[in-house]
Image (cartoon, rainbow, N blue to C red):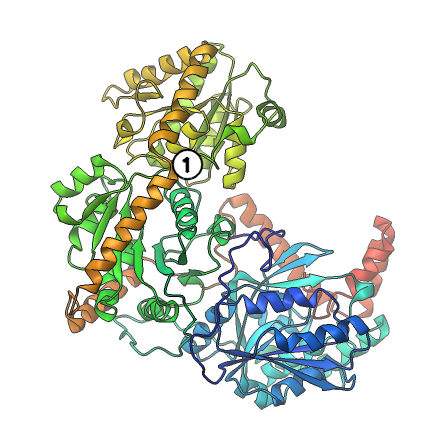
Amino acid sequence: MKPDFSLTPVSTQRADYGYRPGSHSDPLVSIITPYFNAGPVFWETARSLLRMSFVDWEWIVVNDGTTDAESQSQLERLPKLDARVRLVKQDNLGPSAARNRAVKESSGRYIFQIDADDLVEPTFLEKAIWLLETQPQFSFVNSWTVNFGQTESLWREGFSRLADFLTRNWVHMCALIRREAWRDIGGYDESLRKGNEDWEFWLRMAQRGHWGYTIQEYLTWFRWQGQEHSLRHQMSMEEEKQFISTLQERFGEMGQKFPNPLWKPEVEYAEIEMTLPFRNRVERKQSETRVLMLLPWLEQSGADRFNLEAMRALSARNYKFTIVTTAPAQNDWYNEFLTVTPDIFSLDAFLNRIDYPRFLSYLIESRGINAIVISNSENGYLMLPYLQSRHPEVALLDFNHMEQPGWRSGGYPSMAARVRPPIDVNIVASEHLKSWMQRNGADASRLKLVRAGVDPDLWTPAAYERPVVRESLGIRDETPIILFVGRVVARKRPLLFANVIKRLNEANLNFAAFVIGDGEELPMLQSNLKEMGLAEKVRCLGSQSNERVREIMAGADILLLPSQHEGIAAVLYEAMSMEVIPVAADVGGARELVTPETGYLIPRQDDKAAELGGYVETLKGLLTDPLRRQIVQKRARKRITDLFAMKQTAEQLDQAIREAQTAAIQRTTPVIDPALARWMTHLNVELMRRERTIDRKFATHEIQETKAWKATYSLVTRWWDLKLKLLPLGSRRLKWYEQVTGRLTGSKAEATTAAKGSDSGNVN
């Protein structure tokens, strides 16, 4: 996932659950913050900490001789925010002394250091603590960083740089640290008052054999306020040279013996640990319904779009959601889901599979979960026996959109039919799928039909100026637009889409086409379009936000969806609500939504040429008849508003969850014997381990897969490593090099700034 710089952890566009402690206990984490004339931005830091999902903390803010009256008044109001906040005052001794003082005043097993103007994601502490509890070889943990403010960038370097820390500081100081490691090195060097104190701190940690891990998620936010306003770095060039020279004298011999703790590997047939390493009971209201969603990922797909809109609708009914993704992915829609819930956990980022079951058990206990809903997560189904045996009072449901021929004997609906005992309610999106599941062994009494609707007030063309949208796309008013929206995968038959477009283009028809979505078949589609001479005719836009999809649909006319198989594709609901005419394959439950008056369904045929002709002739008729398009478009939207609005869907989902809760309450004992459930989970975890090994190399899961990109990345990386060796920070060679390049580019000022890039803040 890549953060949206405008969607900071304190943005009003984000969901905020305002977690509070549900019970009193000694703090597990001590948050420490040095404060000196921080100003108004400090309230954002405070809000980000108060929004955290981990609640068992104390926050010690050290007033390091603040002189500004407004800042002083701000500090006086601070303890009133929360009883867990403590204010300590000292003379101005610098941030190092302030951090050391805070630690002396603290009692937590872990120390979380954050400056007075930085931000943290709500789930960082929970993820970091779980990592340190399950990976004891690491002494501290941080994450990828978002640089925001006057400079916006993403920083993906971390502790895996190892001995490279001898030439520069690669991380921001925001991290969770074991108290015993802090105690072992004696904290910060208080003589360092002009910056770089955290660089020296990390090297002393390494000297004592301590090292850390960087979570490959953007969970901390570093604020740039401009060098002239920075209190982090006040060294002159000469002072910095002397500082670096001193570091190299003290730590230079560590190059060959730098600590390198490795991620604990997945072990064959490892025993499942049942004991929770810590507890985090949050306060919950009796009127709330807490739901744990088990999803494979957060990607642009019909299932995830439905999940997003359904969660938003249920949130208005006092539902609170915790999302767990169970498969490695880029999670491109992470930001979309943050507007619905702050509680999102991608398990592969911070846990081994052997710890998945007890982490889910921890979440159930922590949040007071009432119901678990599985949607398209094989790992979720595999862990059901464990969860049901450990938490028999929790309702278990799943939601299925379509069967998947050729995979797992029918895909997720097949899994649902085979795990009948634990699941209380099987929700299906169509009559077609309901009948399929009954034929394949599902308990008919537990099947409940909930049609996947859409919010017509959100998905409405009235919210957009159609001419303005079309102008932004570079399309003239009289040119109809054909869309392909969704994951570009084999099941969607993108090659058939390309061939249809080719035939329409050969007929000299006036139209434009756009492809919205990513997927493994997108490179092939782009290659085919280029070979067909359609690269200019069809624009591939990649993955887009829901807002952008709605905007483009507001200027479009036709949705072309020639899928091999579907349930009822979510994009059909959305397109019809936006007055976009569906021309889709007559598969799954499509007939339950699309009628002859509201769209066109093309039958699947063994004769591929005839099937292709069906799409082409239907589209020819629509492209050449604007009046016909207008009539069908209005009818399509009316069908949505009358029968398939998300309001009705939310009511049906609410009823299904309450029915499942009733069934769970009536259970007196677990459906599955706990010992048997544990053994089944043991085998299932081993199955997950064998099927996919998570690559723990730093920053691999976002690296592009094209050969050209890999070659470029390798070349740049090698050049950077070579430059660090040939031109170490503070050296005369580096100064000479920057003076020469500065003159060549006419930017001597930029070269000077680059030479000062080794302080704790300048990690990008």
In-front residue for pair 132/367: 367
Is there any visible trace of residue 233 in the rendered image? no
Identity of the amino acid at label 1?
Val
Residue at numbered disc 1 = 488
Q: Report the residue that reaches farthest toward the front.
A: 287
In the picture, the quarter occupied by the C terminus is bottom right
Q: What crowding class fits label 1: few (fewer than 14 Cα within 10 Å), some (14-19), or many (20 or more)?
A: many
Q: Residue at x 28, y 33 (%)?
A: 565
Q: Is residue 649 left or right of residue 707?
A: left
Indicate the position of residue 249 as horizontal and vertical percent values.
73, 83
Towards the viewer: 529 or 328: 328
Q: Nearer the viewer, residue 509 or 711?
A: 509
Which residue is nearer to you in this view: 18 or 621? 18
Identify the secondary structure beneath mark 1: loop
Q: Quadrant of residue 708?
A: top right
Residue at 25% over, 40% down: 404
Residue 648 image position (x, y, % from top left)? 34, 40
**Taking 317 as reference, is 176 left or right?**
right
Drawn side of residue 30 relative to residue 428, left or right? right
Q: Position of residue 478 (x, y in %)?
A: 56, 14
Which residue is depicted at the point 60% across and 55% down?
A: 11
Residue 363 location (% of width, % of height): 37, 68
**Where is residue 572, by image quadrant?**
top left
Q: Is residue 23 above or below residue 433?
A: below
Left or right of residue 690: residue 638? right
Can residue 525 be seen here? The reply is yes
Query: Which residue sits at x=31%, y=68%?
Result: 357
Q: Is residue 381 above or below residue 514?
A: below
Q: Residue 43's image quarter?
A: bottom right
How many marks are shown on the rendered structure? 1
